[in-house]
Image (tube, helix red, strand yellow):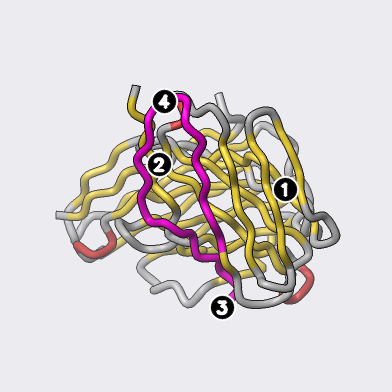
Amino acid sequence: ETGVTQTPRHLVMGMTNKKSLKCEQHLGHNAMYWYKQSAKKPLELMFVYNFKEQTENNSVPSRFSPECPNSSHLFLHLHTLQPEDSALYLCASSSRGQSLNSPLHFGNGTRLTVT
Amino acid sequence: SQQGEEDPQALSIQEGENATMNCSYKTSINNLQWYRQNSGRGLVHLILIRSNEREKHSGRLRVTLDTSKKSSSLLITASRAADTASYFCATPFLPGGYQKVTFGTGTKLQVIP
């Protein structure tokens, strides 16, 4: 149990589908992050939320739409994805988003396959 | 880009041996962090070393930091099969007042029983 729970663990979707990834943290943290991990590439930071407000959008295509209804929950809504979007999507949280000394706590990710 | 780069990309050792992984980064840092990722799982934070520290220990882990060379190393002593994982260094920074943490591609460590 990492304290950060991601669902589903695996997702297969067609390019015309709409699906959502869910992340929940039970650590009382105020910052949450979405990362994309593709084979042989560095982790790509996608979005950052602090106190439910989006503070970073790292030039992510609009087919990825994040939502943070409260400090404990983070969603990533997906629509009309491309096969190259297949990857492991990782959610993370940190206790204080304004601090450099708050390590990230990761969930176990959602393995997404776009067919 | 702030991200660190790990070296080597892959490392295979026998159980009981020591494993050393290196990280280089590009700009000045406040601290550097090391994470481990088991196959198909999320990353787990291992250790944080601040820019004014040169060495830090945690159990079988020893981390060094050389800010003049913009490099860090992670040493795992007396390795075990359970240490098989990918290891990443990370450099947090604060653009606009909120933390961003960037990672490299990692070192894939295999410990052979």
What kind of element bears circle 4?
loop
Q: Are marks 4 and 1 in contact (CB under 8 Å)?
A: no
Rate crowding at label 2 as few (under 14), some (14 to 19) or many (20 or more) other CA atoms within 10 Å: many
Disc 1/disc 2 C-alpha distance (Å): 20 Å
Rate crowding at label 1 as few (under 14), some (14 to 19) or many (20 or more) other CA atoms within 10 Å: many
| Amino acid beneath label 2 | Leu
Residue stretch rendered in magenta on the structure: B1-23
Disc 4/disc 1 C-alpha distance (Å): 25 Å
- Chain under callout 1: B
Q: Which residue is mark 3?
A: B1
Q: Which residue is mark 2?
A: B109
| Left or right, residue A102 beside residue B26 | right
As drawn, the label of residue B15 is 4
Q: Position of residue A34 (x, y in %)?
A: 51, 55
Q: Which residue is mark 1?
A: B48
What kind of element bears circle 2?
strand
| Amino acid beneath label 1 | Leu
Q: Position of residue A87 (x, y in %)?
A: 31, 54
- Chain under callout 2: B
